[in-house]
Image: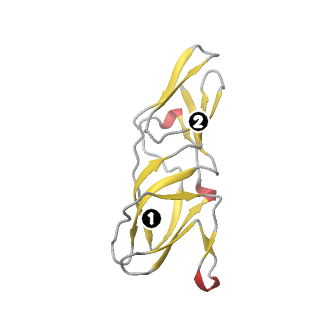
Amino acid sequence: MISVLNWEPFCSLGSEMKCGNCGEISEKWQYIRLMDSVALKGGRGSASMVQKCKLCARENSIEILSSTIKSYNAEDNEKFKTIVEFECRGLEPVDFQPQAGFAAEGVESGTVFSDINLQEKDWTDYDEKTQESVGIFEVTHQFVKC
């Protein structure tokens, strides 16, 4: 059994984004990384991603709030849990595709599995210490507006 699923700071999150002004949804996946910082126009600070809408030309941004990143533990299995929050300034995620950069730990063995790629929404490996297969299956998500 896997105990902890962590999202590493260098990991990228793939998302389809919607413009909060005109409702246009991006045609391609957009990738957001915690370590990225892009300056906003007019010296108004920075964000994890800044994007100009192709339809209305409005500059929108989204910031990953690093202080909100949480682990998904074995006791959270089959439940939705907030693992990261975003400050959305005109740019709203509408779909999510996990990428590489996740890490997990075996409950009984403490074996660390790093750089897990969840792009296919499933991952399997073998824990030598417990001599058992381990895995993450059917990754699902939901966005909740605050």
**Which secondary structure, mark 2?**
strand
Q: Where is residue 119 shown, x and y percent of the image?
A: 47, 42
Q: Is residue 49 left or right of residue 52?
A: right
- Sequence-wise, the earlier of marks 2 and 1 is 2
> Quarter of the image holding residue 104?
top right
Quarter of the image containing the C terminus? bottom left
Q: Nearer the viewer, residue 103 or 12?
A: 12
Residue beneath the point at 43% across and 38% down? 120
Say what secondary structure mark 1 lies in. Answer: loop
Q: Is residue 136 above or below residue 49?
A: above
Label 2 sits on residue: 4
Q: How far apart in space, not on screen, are marks 2 and 1 (Cα)?
A: 25 Å
Q: Residues within 10 Å of mark 2 (few under 14, many from 20)?
A: many
- Which residue occupies the foreground of this view, 101 or 74? 101
Q: How many marks?
A: 2
Mark number for residue 146?
A: 1
Amino acid type assigned to the residue bearing label 1 in the image? Cys
- Report the residue at 43% width, 32% height from top: 137
Label placed on residue 17: none
The crowd level at tag 1 (other Cα within 10 Å; few <14, some 14-19, many 20+) is: few
Which coloring applies here? Answer: secondary structure
31 left or right, relative to 36: left
The residue lying furthest to the top in this view is 131
Q: In the displayed image of the protein, which residue is found farthest to the left?
A: 23
Question: Looking at the image, which residue is at 58% across and 36% down?
Answer: 4
What percent of the width, then of the height, locates residue 46?
Answer: 62, 73
**Residue type, label 2:** Val
Give x and y (percent) for residue 77.
46, 35
- Counting from the top left corner in percent of width and height, residue 132 is at 54, 16
Please determine whether, in this image, residue 72 is positioned above or below residue 1. Answer: below
- Determine whether, in the image, residue 109 is placed left or right of residue 141: right
